[in-house]
Image (cartoon, rainbow, N blue to C red):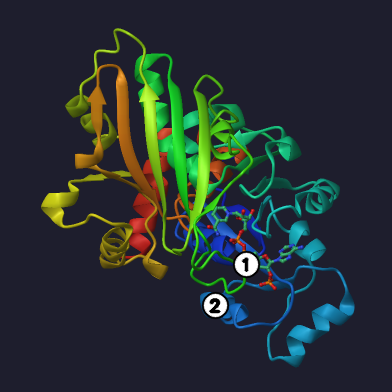
Amino acid sequence: MWGHRMSIKVAINGYGTIGKRVADAVDAQDDMEVVGVTKTGPSFGCDLAVKKGFPLYCTFDDADRIARFAEQGYECSGSLSDLLAIADVVVDCSPGKMGADNLAKYQNAGVKYMFQGGEKHALTGLSYTSSANHTENLNAEGTRVVSCNTTGLSRTLVPLYEHCGSLKVECTMIRRAADPGDSNKGPINAIKPVLKVPSHHGPDVMTVKPEIEINSLAVAVPTTIMHVHAIIADLPEGHGLTTESILEMWTDTPRVIIMHGSDNRITTTAEVMEMARDIGRKWGDLHEIFVWEDGVKLVGDRLYYFQAIHQESDVIPENVDCIRALMGTEPDWQTSVAKTDAAISKYYNC
Ligand SMILES: NC(=O)c1ccc[n+]([C@@H]2O[C@H](COP(=O)([O-])OP(=O)(O)OC[C@H]3O[C@@H](n4cnc5c(N)ncnc54)[C@H](OP(=O)(O)O)[C@@H]3O)[C@@H](O)[C@H]2O)c1
């Protein structure tokens, strides 16, 4: 067990959309520090690491690749192996499906590891969201922080499940086609159904909360800013809930925002993201799941609702909580969530 005064040394392998955000969120905490971030080679993304003062390492152990950083004017502190040697835990933020190769490197270095949702559960045999299974992840060697969609589903479904004791869910994931910084993905003028049915998104919730019976369909649509989930949940008899009490439950749930769409003129994801930019976090991020109050309705035992997910950022605070779980420094998920979120708010002065 780690003493609370020690600073956990965190390596970030892959400094892209998720990696740069995790690095900032770790930097905001007082119980952990970024000891280095990796890039495959010199590019504009290195400038952010330099500006933040994060030591820059090369993703590979190859001397030629390391030398290229200096040729472009960047100081490279060494290779991935050098970085792993000084870290307690590595947060793998490489593009999906690179996990197997990277896992061997982490295990050889004897460092704890966390993957992201682009990897399958089978890689680690353990997955993580803060509200569902923090305790199961305590002191584990490695885990996977589930995807943005699974994180979003978990945020609103886990408290419902905890109240009801059972839950059957069908949902449709209306997915953004690409992140704003991507130029090689689509569709740009089509709606693309995921023809593998059910899609993996719903069942992935069962990697963190197997008791929730859930299936999903997915379609990709030409937008870059958010995903929307259309959810139908069947509650068991005798649940004792009303539309109003469900809204109260989510109002009291960390990292969920409930707002009335019509009253606030916030009826699409465009306005949700505009509101997020007003909050003032870097990149206009919204770590919280957004639920439209007027889109929630319990009819008999069947609950209908919509929620919006900022795909680039909802998993970021979860990564911070997950570091504490793996290191065994904070056994209570709610305490970790409160600490993470307070530090992030202070960091961005909002
Ligand atoms: N984007 C999202 O909306 C989102 C949401 C939740 C989860 N995720 C998951 O998070 C992970 C990272 O996704 P991302 O969107 O951040 O990807 P990304 O923006 O493409 O960033 C990945 C970074 O890793 C670097 N990289 C390439 N090969 C690498 C390797 N072998 N080892 C280490 N780093 C390598 C990339 O290249 P350079 O170093 O050359 O820049 C890039 O900076 C994936 O598993 C993804 O599924 C993504």
Q: Which residue was labeled with disc 1?
A: 15
The residue positioned 70% from the left and 55% from the top of the image is 87
Amino acid of disc 1: Tyr
Position of residue 237 in the picture relative to residue 7 (left or right): left
Q: Are marks 1 and 2 in contact (CB under 8 Å)?
A: yes
Is label 1 within 8 A of ligand 1 (CB to nearest ligand atom)? yes
The residue positioned 45% from the left and 51% from the top of the image is 314
Query: Is residue 1 something one can see in this rendering?
Result: no
Q: Which residue was labeled with disc 2?
A: 48
Per the image, label 2 sits on a secondary structure element best described as helix
Q: Quadrant of ligand 1?
A: bottom right
The residue positioned 79% from the left and 53% from the top of the image is 102
Is residue 215 shown above or below 270?
above
Position of residue 201 in the picture relative to residue 66 (left or right): left
Amino acid of disc 2: Leu
> Where is residue 322 drawn, in percent x and y?
55, 42
Per the image, label 1 sits on a secondary structure element best described as loop
